[in-house]
Amino acid sequence: EVEALARAKRFDDARQRWAEHKAKHFSKEEGSDVLDIINSIEKGDEAELLRKRYEESKQLADLRMLVQELVSKSDYRQLANYAPAFARQTGQVSDLRMASQTLYHEGQYAELIDLLEPFPDAIEQDNEIKSLKAWSLFDLGRVMEARPLARELFAQRHHANDRELAINTAVESGDWG
């Protein structure tokens, strides 16, 4: 309730509810954490609070909150640090896609390939992940590895990016056919 009030920009109401309930419902540490959340939301630096919380706890729940906040802020620089760790822990295709998109956006192609290595099923299930992997391989100069992925993608969905990658890999590999 207190957090919802703070997110609704009703900071005085949030502090009032916090004061009413801190002795009854919160330990001293929890009460301090809730007040920190109110203050960080008001200052607009919630990501920093969540980052510190995660660095101390190393808990998946804290990492999830941090990643969600960074996504909402479109902070790709920091997201490139935390999204891969989150995706590795969850193994969810949607999390792997988000982490891959972030790494590709930041030009961290080798890191993207390393992230996806233990998850071959995700690559087969999600054409966006497959495309990001193929483009990363191409950008790293690993044309022969990118070529079959490019052809497969183009055969499946006929997207302009897939066609461009198929042409680029054909030109680079000398496979004009």
Image (cartoon, rainbow, N blue to C red):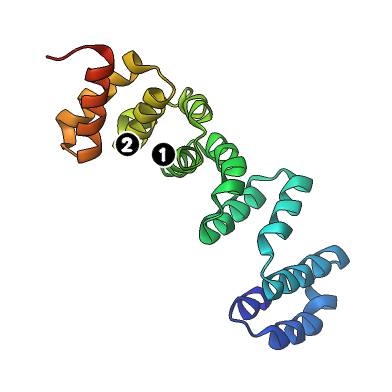
* Image quadrant in which the N terminus is located: bottom right
Q: Crowdedness of circle 2 by 10 Å Cα count: few (<14), some, many (20+)?
A: some
Q: Distance between the residues labelled 1 and 2?
A: 7 Å
Bin the neighbour count of mark 1 within 10 Å (Cα to Cα): few under 14, some 14-19, many 20 and up. Answer: some
Left or right of 113? Residue 169 is left
| Residue positioned 52% across, 55% down in the render | 71
Q: Name the residue under label 2.
A: 126
| Residue at figure coordinates x 55%, y 56% from the top left | 68
Q: Quadrant of residue 26?
A: bottom right
State the residue in front, 42 or 171.
171
Q: Tell me if label 1 and label 2 are in contact, CB under 8 Å.
A: yes
Expressed as whole percent of the image width and height from the top left, the position of residue 153 reads 23, 30
Where residue 94 appears, as percent x and y from the top left, is 42, 44
Left or right of 147 on screen, residue 37 = right
Tell me the quarter of the image containing the C terminus.
top left
Above or below, 159 relative to 69: above
Q: Residue at x 72, y 43 (%)?
A: 58
What is the total number of numbered labels drawn onto the structure image? Answer: 2
Q: Quadrant of residue 31?
A: bottom right
Q: Work out whether 146 lies above or below 93.
A: above
Position of residue 52 relative to residue 15, above or below, is above
User: Tag 2: residue type?
Assistant: Asp
For image coordinates 85% across by 63% down, the residue present is 29
Q: Nearer the viewer, residue 114 or 110?
A: 110
Give the side of residue 89 with respect to residue 32, left or right.
left
The answer to which quarter of the image holds residue 48 is bottom right
Residue 105's x, y, as percent? 46, 42
Considering only order in the chain, which callout, 2 or 1, is on the residue closer to the N terminus?
Answer: 1
Q: Does residue 122 appear anywhere in the picture?
A: yes
SS class, disc 2: loop
